[in-house]
Amino acid sequence: MALISLKHVTKRYKGLQRPALDDVSVDIDRGDFVFLVGASGAGKSTFLSLLLREEIATSGEIHVAGHDLRRLPNRRVPAYRREIGFVFQDYKLLMNKTVRENVAFALEVIGTRRSQIGPQVDRALRDVGLESKADKRPSELSGGEMQRVSIARAYVNQPKIILADEPTGNLDPTTSVGIMRVLNAINLTGTTIVMATHNEEIVNSMSKRVLELNGGRLVRDEANGRYDSARYFPDAQAEREAALDGGTVHMGAVNASIQTQTPRDNVTVNANAAADSAATAVSDGISAGAGEDEGIAKLEQAIHSGNTGVYGKVFENVEDTLTWGKGLRLDEYAAQQKKQDTSAQSTHANDGADNKVLEDKVVENPQLPDSDAKFRPAHADYSEDDSRAVSDGAQDARVPADAAQADVAADAPQVDAAQSDIAQSGAVQSGAVQSPQGDAAPAATQGVGTDSPDDPAHVDTLAQLARGTAHKQSVPAQPVPVPPPAPPMPAPQQASGDKNANNTEGVN
Ligand SMILES: Nc1ncnc2c1ncn2[C@@H]1O[C@H](COP(=O)(O)OP(=O)(O)OP(=O)(O)O)[C@@H](O)[C@H]1O
């Protein structure tokens, strides 16, 4: 079974005529990086809330990391959520704690031994380039820095899954690139990432799997997908939304998709103004963020070079011997994927401008296999037992769940105190904290994967993103019905001419 599996999931909220999610079926495997896209109200947050077990499906089945969420008793929900990292658009940091304390909190709440907390927190902060801000409070940080704290908090325990709801939604383009670099690096360690976003530049530049929701229905599931928000989010609607929500401007295909950071930016801008705004944000980011870049460069270097110190050694064997359920060693699996990718790339090469980024990779790095290939099983073939083994930490040394849970039990008062602290702070539940974790160190330091951000093609696309000049390619050559501006929603379409597009069971 896939790491995340939804079968015919429908979610109805009281008082809503239309379901927020409507008969959605999808599998997400370990190591996937999935963008969840769609217009405002399409159901993205509902999708994530169901995975986090904040909401319960009205009908259908949801399995996550071996847990049947329908049958998960309430008392086990907190432990379940510790296997998941969650990054919120509005950070949800504890404002009365320092950066270090915010990240440490994720470990305290699961009862990690105090002697382990310090080194793990330091490493996580180093990975996101924030060691110099460790003793600051969130109010002293920029939006990008706050989001990096929340990412450090989300992955300090190396959760199997990170769910991110618009993590760049309040950030300028340059800062968004930094956030995406960190998430990408974390994904390269095998952590599955499901990220809801409106940002088409990010989706189109990163070229990951795309799930598109429309009116609660899953209308597209496409490998190396793209997103054109104008299809379902016309500018007129964006302007209405911007006027209503007082802080967020969503722009269609013509305008850059930028979400403003402050009310003074609360204007609808045309293409030129968007470009100016992006350029200003970039220069602001550069002048304000030299330290950030250095920290991220460190992360990139650690991932790329494999220079991961003692923590790298801890995981070396695990990464060498992962088989992804296919009976292949990782290097064999990567070789197999490389072969498949080479033939897929030659097919894509005829697709014109839409595949410019992919072509760049082929030209500049003929020797490099697809970056994520080694973490992307060709299809879902986890058995129920496999999932359980992952959940138990039996095969996944990164998550020694039993040991950590024992720690939790032994340290219950501390957990209670910490949880009440969260409640007081309004930082919501343990969605912000993650998997039980014993001695393990942040996986993003493992030095695995060949598609580190040092990959020139990767840098190229991220640089485009930073400059706000990422390709504004046309919609992929696929029949796309343009829906009317209001319900009823259009019939969902099968995806694309992309031969990698998966079938979408929920589509009918
Ligand atoms: N707790 C709730 N109670 C009632 N209705 C809700 C609730 N949460 C979401 N909805 C409704 O469900 C639908 C889907 O909302 P959801 O927040 O999942 O969309 P979204 O795609 O995340 O939108 P956005 O991009 O604006 O965050 C919307 O019509 C919304 O108003």
Image: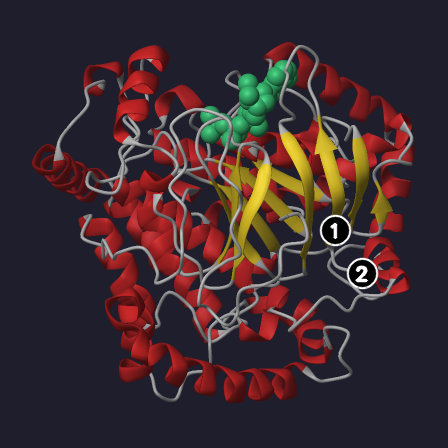
- Give the amino acid at mark 1: Ser
Q: Quadrant of the N terminus?
A: bottom right
| Label 1 element class | strand
Q: Is residue 382 left or right of residue 149?
A: right
| Label 2 element class | loop
Return the mark for residue 477: none
Q: Is residue 427 visible?
A: no
Q: Is residue 42 visible?
A: yes
Q: CA distance from mark 2 to mark 1?
A: 7 Å
Q: Is residue 199 left or right of residue 379?
A: left
Q: In which quarter of the view is residue 61 placed?
A: top right
Q: Where's ligand 1: which quadrant?
A: top right
- Give the amino acid at mark 2: Met
Residue at the disc numbered 1? 5
Viewer-proximal residue among 279 and 109: 279
In the rendered image, the vertical position of residue 462 relative to residue 248, given as above or below:
below
